[in-house]
């Protein structure tokens, strides 16, 4: 797909009569589609019995699609194991943290550490790769589907013990790192080490964090085994995996993405898990930015919402215009491919109410026509967009060790890593300030502002990287509960914020977890920060500055007057330490000041998202109206509409859920 924008659908020919395939392929072609994902759930159809393969039906499906000008991405089908695989060995089943084993009937019920299951996976992947290595219509592969949750099975326990032995080398080193002498938990044999089942109560934090890392590594290695088979047989095909955005917190996606040619992800802006959760636009934008940041390159959306989602329940349908809007939002944030899930709504199975572009009866309706409008537009303009890049001066640091550690010990019932991270991102998004997402050890020299929410676990490498950034002239924002833990998930043996203390220029003398109470922040009128009081209700660090200026103090309780927010000059840069945590109000207030101080503030409009991609020296400006009501915005000069070719100047008017792309 080099130089061409990918637009298509996820299709399941095995679920429909063969005489319908050509009709569907013609509808895809007429909609301007050029790619189709196939077979990621078709294992039993491809291998109906052990070692007996049937590719004839898939060959015919690919030929039908190819005859209509469509290229194919194949999914390795290991997320949905056949009943005959699972019936042969019950130890394959993944076990949840409550000690209950999965049972057959859903997907991803396997334990990723199970050697027997991996042998089954190797067999079907090797057979598929051999079958389609030289097929001219096949361009790429998706490994498995939405790698999933941790397994606490006996197989996982044995694999965990071996992983720990490789990591630490000796029981003495592991016991020392975990402080296992606490509660007499010192281990004298690797076989004694448990997995952190809920039935055992809260586990040693060092063990629990290592188990989260081990679980993530298990999926990374399972993916790598499949990927190496595919690459060896199909060196000219790309290999990817469909991740689940910022919201998924069981796998270190930086590690998972490292082996892929590029990242894809599954974007469902309106589903039951977020339909009542607030700003759909900011949430989706955060997902896109997170995926773009994993490899610092453009990505695809392998599953783009095509209708109302639902298994047992059905969420509200996308309103007319939203499917096209959501697809363009993904492009605005760096997508070079959009694949709608799914083509036709299923008549059978768990996803009967997960609506596709076509209705249950296969008829064309508004959703297909809207996707067709989008597909035909990209057929005309896609080459001008593909490969263009987003550029940002602001970056947020996403740290999976910190996220895992705060899963284990949240510190406060309301302290959620994802929520606090989203508060900072949403405050930027609302101001139309583009932001990247990176890890704490990435090169940060391209940015002027780095925000590190809840950087709870800090390694010497991360601390040195942040100091280098600040010394070079950057502004770093740290929050409370940063620098609390070392790499073993032990509380540091020094005043907080630990390895970041000298950089921040403060010492945390005490802290207060606010449960059922709140405190106020009053900003110092003698500083450049002139803002109204803000209330916080989750956490308060009491700060003792050691060279830092005080920007805000607490107004209530026994620590009224104590420093709450500080700024420390370091080299050519500065560090803002935000010692209080509450809702979105505090990030909103601080970013209003920080962005104005950096002259980076952008136009803030009501549900009108404005973002940019650059094709060399050519700027592409995306205007996305996330409201049902018309929106208008003043343009700074004359531009050209990429969608229509018309000259545009003065006031740009967008209809409800409307989209415009302008070039200077």
Image (cartoon, rainbow, N blue to C red):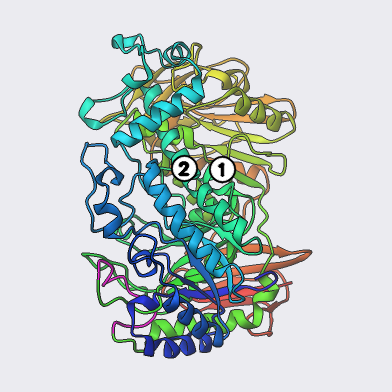
How far from the left and from the top, in percent, is residue 580?
43, 30
- Say which element carries label 1: strand
Give above or below for 76 relative to 328: above
Give above or below for 226 relative to 49: above
Residue indicated by mark 2: 421
Q: Is residue 663 visible?
A: yes
Q: Residue furthest right?
A: 617
Quadrant of the rendered structure where residue 22 is? bottom left
How far from the left and from the top, in percent, is residue 131?
53, 68
Looking at the image, which residue is at 60% across and 31% down?
527
Cβ atoms under marks 2 and 1 closer than 8 Å? yes
Looking at the image, which residue is at 36% across and 15% down?
189
Q: Can residue 605 be seen in this view?
A: no
Toward the viewer: 1 or 357? Answer: 1
Question: Which residues make up the magenta segment?
Answer: 349-360
Give above or below for 572 relative to 292: above
């Amino acid at each position: 797909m080099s130089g061409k924008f990918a637009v298509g659908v996820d299709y399941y020919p095995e679920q429909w009569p063969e005489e319908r395939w050509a009709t569907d392929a013609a509808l895809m072609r007429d909609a301007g589609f050029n790619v189709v994902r196939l077979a990621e759930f078709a294992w039993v159809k491809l291998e109906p019995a052990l070692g007996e393969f049937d590719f004839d039906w898939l060959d015919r499906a690919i030929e039908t699609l190819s005859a209509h000008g469509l290229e194919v991405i194949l999914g390795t089908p290991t997320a949905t194991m056949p009943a005959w695989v699972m019936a042969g060995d019950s130890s394959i089943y993944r076990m949840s943290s409550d000690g209950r084993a999965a049972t057959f009937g859903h997907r991803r019920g396997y334990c990723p550490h199970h050697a027997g299951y991996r042998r089954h996976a190797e067999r079907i992947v090797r057979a598929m790769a051999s079958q389609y290595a030289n097929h001219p219509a096949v361009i790429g592969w998706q490994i498995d589907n939405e790698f999933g949750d941790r397994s606490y099975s006996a197989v996982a326990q044995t694999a965990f013990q071996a992983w720990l032995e490789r990591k630490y080398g000796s029981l003495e080193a592991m016991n020392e790192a975990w402080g296992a002498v606490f509660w007499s938990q010192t281990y004298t044999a690797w076989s004694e080490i448990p997995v952190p089942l809920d039935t055992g109560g809260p586990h040693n934090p060092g063990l629990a964090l290592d188990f989260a890392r081990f679980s993530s590594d298990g999926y990374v290695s399972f993916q790598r085994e499949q990927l190496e088979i595919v690459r060896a047989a199909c060196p000219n095909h790309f290999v990817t995996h469909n991740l689940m955005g910022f919201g998924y917190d069981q796998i270190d996606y930086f590690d998972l993405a490292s082996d892929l040619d590029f990242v894809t992800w599954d974007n469902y802006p309106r589903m039951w898990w977020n339909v009542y959760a607030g700003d759909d636009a900011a949430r989706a934008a955060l997902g896109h930015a997170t995926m773009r940041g994993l490899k610092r390159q453009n990505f695809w959306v392998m599953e783009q919402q095509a209708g109302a989602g639902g298994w047992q329940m059905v969420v509200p349908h996308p309103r007319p215009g939203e499917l096209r809007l959501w697809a363009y939002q993904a492009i605005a944030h760096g997508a070079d491919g959009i694949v709608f899930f799914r083509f036709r709504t299923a008549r059978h199975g768990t996803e009967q109410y997960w609506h596709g572009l076509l209705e249950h009866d296969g008829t064309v309706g508004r959703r297909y026509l809207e996707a067709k409008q989008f597909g035909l537009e990209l057929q005309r303009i896609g080459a001008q967009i593909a490969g263009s890049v987003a550029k940002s001066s602001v970056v947020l640091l996403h740290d999976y060790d910190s996220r895992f550690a705060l899963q284990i010990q949240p510190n406060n019932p309301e302290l959620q890593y994802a929520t606090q991270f989203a508060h900072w991102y949403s405050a930027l998004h609302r101001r139309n300030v583009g932001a990247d997402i990176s890890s704490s050890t990435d090169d940060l020299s391209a940015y002027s502002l780095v925000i590190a929410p809840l950087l709870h676990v800090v390694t010497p490498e991360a601390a040195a990287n942040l100091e280098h950034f600040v010394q070079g002239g950057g502004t770093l924002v740290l929050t409370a509960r940063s620098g609390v833990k070392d790499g073993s998930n032990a509380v540091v043996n020094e005043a907080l914020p630990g390895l970041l203390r000298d950089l921040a220029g403060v010492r945390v003398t005490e802290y207060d977890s606010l449960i059922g109470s709140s405190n106020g922040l009053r900003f110092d009128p003698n500083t450049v920060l002139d803002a109204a009081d803000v209330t916080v209700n989750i956490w308060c660090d009491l700060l003792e500055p050691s060279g830092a200026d005080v920007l805000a103090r607490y107004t209530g309780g026994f620590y009224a007057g104590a420093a709450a927010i500080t700024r420390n000059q370091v080299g050519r840069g500065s560090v803002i330490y935000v010692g209080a945590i509450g809702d979105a109000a505090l990030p909103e207030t601080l970013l209003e000041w920080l962005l104005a101080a950096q002259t980076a503030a952008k136009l803030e409009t009501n549900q009108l998202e404005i973002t940019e991609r650059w094709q060399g020296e050519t700027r592409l400006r995306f205007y996305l109206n996330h409201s049902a009501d018309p929106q208008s915005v003043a343009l700074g000069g004359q531009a050209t509409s990429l969608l229509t070719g018309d000259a545009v100047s003065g006031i740009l008017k967008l209809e409800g859920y409307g989209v415009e792309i302008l070039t200077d």
